Amino acid sequence: MGLDADGAGAHPAAAAVARLAGADLVSGTRLARTVRHAENAGLTFVSFTDALLPAVAGSPASARLESVTRAAFVSRTTTAIGLVPQVPTTYPEPFHVAAQLASLDIAASGRAGWLAAVTRDAATADAYGRTVVGDVSREARDVVQVVRDLWDSWEDDAVIRDVPTGRYIDRDRVHHVDFVGETFSVKGPLITPRPPQGQLVVLASDGDVRPALGRPGALETDGAERLVDVTLVGGSGVGTARGNATAAREHSPLAGVDLEVVLDAGGRTGADRLAVLDASTPAGVRSPWDTRALRYVGDAAGLVALLTELATPGPDGRRPADGVRLLPSVLDVDLPVLARDVLPALRAARLVAAPRPGATLRESLGLPRPANRYETRVLADAPSA
């Protein structure tokens, strides 16, 4: 179970309805309190949605800090929950993305992930000072591939700290990646040692990043190189979401459902709260709310029933969805209900388990630590005895 912990909440009017000022939205104290609340509730990870441009130009309600900075800040105030910043693949420099995320994984002792996203609007390209990328899917594929190559450019035992010879690293265990894509090239190696997890967990919305290199639908077991570990899907209803998750798992190790939630709280029904939020939404707002995600509006018991349905095994004995990422309409309202009424019921039914302090995000999600691709190639190229 994941939770998006961006700003005041996932709904574009969350800050206005919660009466949060711009200073509140960038407050480290509030951010740390929210993520600790999520960790204490037993959630597996929190994500940090991000965008270069504000939801509403010039509005203090659009204030936010960059996602990796937020994740790094709470890495020292938490011990178990995974930290997954959204970082776009379209315009930032891939080398810097790889270094920032590797550093985050080191700071979080192996609890970092990467929500790889694409940017489709020309205004963002202008803000970066870049020409518009025509094929964002191809760019996403190239960026995720080279970032994974860079994470492996240092072997696990590259740092030797050999005092007698004055060597900090063994240069034979640090590799150039020599990547050439359609719009950029990267020589490498990275300036940061290999992350504690080897490779951070990479999440992506279905359709944004090709899950693996090779033919469409190929898996790592078919000789393809994996790009995405967790594919996030949506759906107009539970049945559609189950079907989308099942289809996504054909080409991705894990599949999760993005779920917008507006819960009964504070003596008001979720429907009433949503009506107020919608009525308070500024015109022309930039927001991912009300896009492809599944949505639930109602009481906590109904949400428990929906999540149970998503977790109910099909004829093959496997759950259609491996998990969900909750997108609460207003964090300060919906998170307490989730912590008090939803998570305990799911744990009692043994549908979820809280992450173990000290565990990596890969361990919490049941993903193995991958071998270093360059070490494997060196061994494969070595002459046999």
Image (cartoon, grey):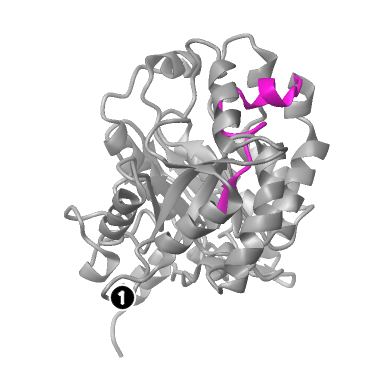
Residue in the foreground of this view, choosing between 19 and 158: 19
Q: Residue at x 59, y 16 (%)?
A: 280
Residue 247 in picture, x, y percent from top left:
25, 57
Q: Is residue 322 visible?
A: no
**Which residue is more in the foreground, 36 or 169?**
36
Camera-nearest residue between 115 and 347: 347
User: What range is drawn magenta here?
Assistant: 2-21
Q: Give x and y (percent) for residue 359.
A: 64, 70
Q: Residue at x 27, y 75 (%)?
A: 316
- Amino acid tagged 1: Ala
Q: List the residue tagged with mark 1.
A: 380
Q: Residue at x 74, y 44 (%)?
A: 34
In this view, 248 is above or below 17? below
Residue 340 shown in magenta: no
Does the magenta segment cover residue 4? yes
Question: Residue 59 vs residue 180: left or right?
Answer: right
Q: Residue 267: horizontal and vertical position, in percent?
A: 71, 37
Q: Looking at the image, can residue 91 be seen?
A: yes
Rendered position, 307 above or below 209: below
Kindly report the secondary structure that dominates the magenta region of the rendered protein: loop
> Pointer 1: residues within 10 angstroms few (<14), some, or many (20+)?
few
- Say what secondary structure mark 1 lies in: helix
Instruction: Name the one closer to the observer, 60 or 257.
Output: 257
Question: Whole-percent x and y of residue 39?
Answer: 71, 57
